[in-house]
Image (tube, rainbow, N blue to C red):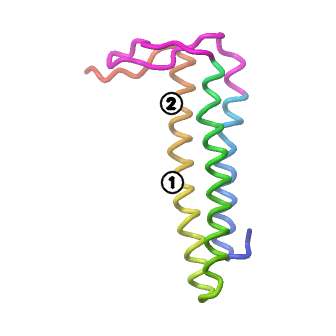
Amino acid sequence: MFRYGRTNGYLTIALIVLAIVPLVEAFLTIPQMPDTVAMAFGAGGEPTRFGSRFELFLVPGICALLGAGMVLTARRQANLSMNSSRAATEFTYRRSIRSGLIMVVLLNVSNIYLLVTAFMGKGFSLAL
């Protein structure tokens, strides 16, 4: 993990932690919800579709899989550029890890939104 530099190691740890956090949130929140929860909302915040509470595990699962995939892809890309300089290898690794961080942060925000709206049973209204 720290083979590609200290900063890259810390970024990798942050990526792994942020990829796992939605699963922890889901495992703590979903058992407290009713069997059927609101999954989609209209512009006024009213529910338009109901589904099983276990559908809420979809986003955390995708986040964990994509986070692990980004770490593996970053390692693979860095290993492919090993023939060039060490700086180029570290930059290649950092670029992939940064992309993964952006992705898991967006999925974390999406997961929090889904859990909050499903728990409350009402979406956020766009009407003023």
The stretch drawn in magenta includes residue 29: yes
Vertically, is 28 above or below 69? above
Q: Looking at the picture, how far across and down is residue 107, in whole percent?
A: 54, 42
Q: Residue furthest front?
A: 80
Vertically, is 61 above or below 12? above
Question: What are the residue bounds of the magenta stretch?
Answer: 28-52
Residue located 35% across and 20% down the image? 125
Residue located 61% across and 32% down the image? 58
Pointer 1 residue = 102
Q: How many marks?
A: 2
Residue located 57% across and 26% down the image? 115
What residue type is disc 1 on? Ile
> Reading the chain from its start, which is encountered first: label 1 or label 2?
1
Q: Residue furthest left?
A: 128
What residue type is disc 2 on? Tyr
Instruction: Report the side of 42 relative to 34 (left or right).
Output: left
| Mark number displayed over residue 22 | none
Residue located 67% across and 30% down the image? 26
Q: Looking at the picture, how far across and down is residue 120, in whole percent?
A: 53, 16
What distance separates the C-alpha of mark 1 from that of mark 2? 17 Å
Q: Looking at the picture, how far across and down is residue 108, in whole percent?
A: 56, 41
Q: Nearer the viewer, residue 59 or 12?
A: 59
